[in-house]
Image (cartoon, rainbow, N blue to C red):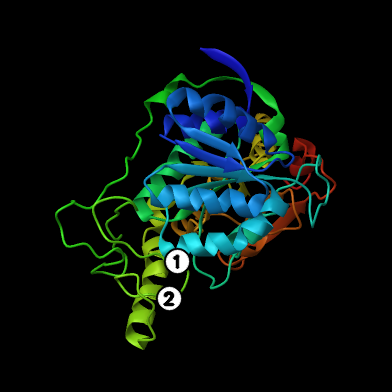
Amino acid sequence: MLEFIDGNTAIVRGAIYAGCNFFAGYPITPATSILLEMIKELPKLNGIAIQVEDELAAIGVCLGAATTGRKAMTATSGPGISLYSENIGLAIMGEVPLVIVDVQRMGPSTGGATKNSEGDIQFIRWVTSGGYPAIALCPIDVETCFSLTVKAFNLSEEYRTPVFILSSKELGLTRDTVDLSPCYRLPVREREYAHPDMEYLPYKFDELDDIPPYSPFGGPHILRFTTSIHDERGILTNDPEKIDRKLRHLDAKIKKAVNKIALTHLDRDQGADILIISYGMTARSVKEAVEIARKKGKKVSHLILYTLWPVPERDISLALKGIKKVIVPELNNGQYLHEISKFVAQRELIGIQRLDGNLIPPSHILAELH
């Protein structure tokens, strides 16, 4: 069934379909409509959605809800992510499943609240202390706002970690005609709980990339939760071996799964020696530019990145085979260009950046296809 909806609405739909039953947020342009829609819809499903006093409270109560067994989500924009930072670190340290939506707008600071940007790319990767890897998914249209929200919940459950959805003002607030019915057949991962009769250690793992079994607060097991470095029981430790093992685990459980987490789409044009790599709203301009170029006889391939973090290294490397020129258009100051530069070797690398709040039109991309 065709509908005329925006990206924020699709994110709400995807979250509810994925089993989200707790939401907390604070109004901020351009993410506010997610908060309002959740407050409207979740109570109908015996869920909880609340507006709290600030962003610190928003992510804090989501963490609390998640540890009791709720599937939780929060949504904000760049200034709110700044305030989320410490609690994002807590979610990583405590291995708490949580989905965080960043509907990006122009920065820095208050920036342009009604201006489009995709400038939080590196910010999301390095948002909290320690430098441990994050998972960040980036939709390109209304349909992928839904499908990647479902994927975000599945990944947060599978890896016991916060997962980011990197939308933007233009995507979040622009309506499009879509048929979301295929999305309602996507698989949903339910939370797996430790057996109530087992001897339970909340942070026990054998191999570094194993995921510890989960048990909710208020459930059958004795639990401890701390923001500080801890052992497998959740007790603070100064033991160098236990510290090293815990922190290597936080790194390995994401990095060793990079090929499983990676979501990309390669539109390869056989014989093409030009590759455009895109993500977010710019991918739509690239699609149109590629179509125009091919009609004119120009061979060009296009790689869309739906997973930005961890970097889908294998997919990028495969897409680069036979390529001499790489073009990376971005609605920021070239933040992902740096990541792509690690793979291009002797190939020509061209970045197209736009910072004024407007979109990159196909003509700007076509101008580089020579």
Residue at 65 percent across and 60 percent down: it is 123
Instruction: Determine the residue located farthest toward the top in the rendered image.
Output: 1
- Foreground residue among 158 and 335: 158
Residue at 33 percent across and 85 percent down: it is 241
> As displayed, is residue 90 above or below residue 163?
below
The residue identified by callout 1 is 93
Label 1 amino acid?
Answer: Met
Callout 1 secondary element: helix
Distance from disc 2 to disc 1, alpha carbons, whole Å, reads 7 Å
Mark 2: give few (<14), some (14-19) or many (20+) Cα within 10 Å. some
- Foreground residue among 44 and 113: 44
- Foreground residue among 5 and 228: 228
The quadrant holding residue 127 is bottom right
> As displayed, is residue 18 above or below residue 102?
above
Residue 239 horizontal side relative to residue 133, left or right: left
In percent of width and height, residue 106 lies at 78, 49
Which of marks 1 and 2 precedes in the sequence? 1
In percent of width and height, residue 354 lies at 80, 49
Callout 2 secondary element: loop
Whether label 2 touches label 1, CB < 8 Å = yes
Residue 327: mark in rendering = none
The residue identified by callout 2 is 229
Residue 339 in view of the camera:
yes
Label 2 amino acid?
Answer: Ile
In percent of width and height, residue 112 lies at 83, 46
Residue at 36 percent across and 46 percent down: it is 69
Residue at 74 percent across and 43 percent down: it is 365
In percent of width and height, residue 212 lies at 29, 61
